Image (cartoon, rainbow, N blue to C red):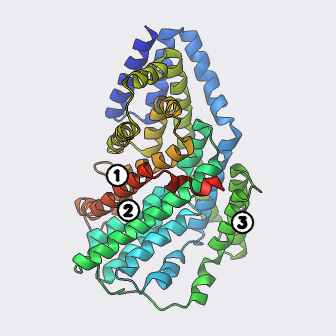
Amino acid sequence: MAVDIGFYGLASLLGLLALRVPVALALILVSLAGMGLMLSWDTAIGMLASKPYDFVAKWTLSAVPMFLLMGFVCFHAGLTSGLFNAAKVVFRWLPGGVAISSIFASSGFAAVCGSSVACAAAMGKIAIPEMVRGGYKPSFACGTIAAGGTIGALIPPSILMIVYGVFAQVSITQVFLGGITIGLLTAVSYSLVILFMSWIKPDVVPRVALGADQQSVRQVLGEIWPVLVLGVLVFGGLFSGFFTATEAGAVGAAGAILIAALLRRLDGKALKMALLETLTTTSALLIIGVGASMFTLFLSLSGVAGFITSAVTGWDPSYLELMLIVVLIYLFLGLFMEPFGAMLVTLPVLLPVFELYDVSLIWFGVLLVKLLEIGMITPPVGMNIFVIKGVAGQYASLVDIFKGVATFLVADLVVVALVIFYPEIVLLLTKG
């Protein structure tokens, strides 16, 4: 009977999500009702009273607001504004050099941001007007930045990876190291797409690096040294073992505020905006996490997780069959769910299955974030597409932006295939 209630709960959750009920509210309502029916309503209310504290009290989660604050301070203080110019100095000699510069500038911004949406918004304001002036087709220029924004959640500090590490109980530092390789692989694959388009469609991507300026390396370093210092400070300490992920976030936030203050770029308005956006984003993530922790408990008590694990054992799919199912699940969920909701709804079911197959949970976490970020640029609810429409809507319609990002989706699927067939791509840096 409990298993039946568990499956009814799963069906109810999907129904509520289809009706556009907020993810956190849907998770909490289903969990509360399910535990009330299985146990008692007093027990369910007691769980609701204790679970928020049990989840939020995890020390590791304090890295989330710290890394968010670091990113928002850097953004509002303008510490990241020189990244695009720096990338142009390196890549201006290539066909499609301005677009390639925007991809690698997004990678640099990701190192102090951790958010796909923030990455797309920041780069969109800077790079899209310049690409359009340089002769790029507007839809492709917008698609480039929308796709480049997804790197924001792949290269550490990734907020998605922090939350995954907490739920899967794996080393966040190890997941970060795996994210570096897949983030750089994604950037390279996008650059190859741009080079290919410049070769077959010069009317879409100019073969000459039009619009690239002639700034010297010294001038560029003068603009981006704050980001370089923060990167060395935070990730040097983190990957050397001197800091934990939580401590690295605190050091990064304090470092960003100190550097911005010393450069006199952090006025009261910028600091207030950074703090408000940090509080808003953190609150939204934590309430979803509370709902997910309750839902995990509900599935565990109902026996659904064990039932699904037993069913998979009885079916005995091959590794490739299992991975095909997982990829299809996340590509489907990405069509209508935001990444955090999709991740936290599915982890309670999938983690036991991957443990059964002895799959590295560090590797799976990195692949999972990549699959979730594909959903950020797929219709009809590709969040990055709507962000680009908001910051550069005068250049292309929503439909045109979706068309412009289509070629990059092909590159994403190639990267996913490579990671599945060659897991050592992700695990390379984690073995040191």
Residue denoted by label 3: 233
Q: Quadrant of the N terminus?
A: top left
- Which mark's residue is nearer the viewer, 3 or 1? 3
Tell me residue 411's x, y (percent). Answer: 34, 61
Q: Is residue 158 above or below residue 260?
A: above
Disc on res. 162: none
Residue denoted by label 1: 382
Q: Residues at badges 1 and 2 in contact (C-beta under 8 Å)?
A: yes
Can the viewer see residue 114?
A: no
Residue at the spot 53% in from the left edge and 10% down from the top edge: 41
- Which mark's residue is nearer the viewer, 3 or 2? 3
Tell me residue 337's x, y (percent). Answer: 38, 42
Q: Quadrant of the C terminus?
A: bottom right
Tag 2 or tag 1, which sits nearer the N-term? 2
Can the viewer see residue 295?
A: yes
Tag 1 or tag 3, which sits nearer the N-term? 3
Badge 2: how crowded within 10 Å, few (<14), some, or many (20+)? many
Tell me residue 285's x, y (percent). Answer: 54, 42
Of helix, strand and loop, which one carries label 3? Answer: helix
Badge 1: how crowded within 10 Å, few (<14), some, or many (20+)? many
Instruction: Give 130 or 183, whichever is nearer the viewer.
Output: 183
Badge 3: how crowded within 10 Å, few (<14), some, or many (20+)? some
Tell me residue 15's x, y (percent). Answer: 33, 27
Extreme right residue here?
Answer: 242
Q: Amino acid at mark 2?
A: Ala
Residue at the spot 36% in from the left edge and 77% down from the top edge: 129
* C-alpha separation, residue under disc 3 versus residue under disc 1: 34 Å
- Count of picture labels: 3
Tag 2 or tag 3, which sits nearer the N-term? 2
Residue denoted by label 2: 146
Q: Amino acid at mark 3?
A: Leu
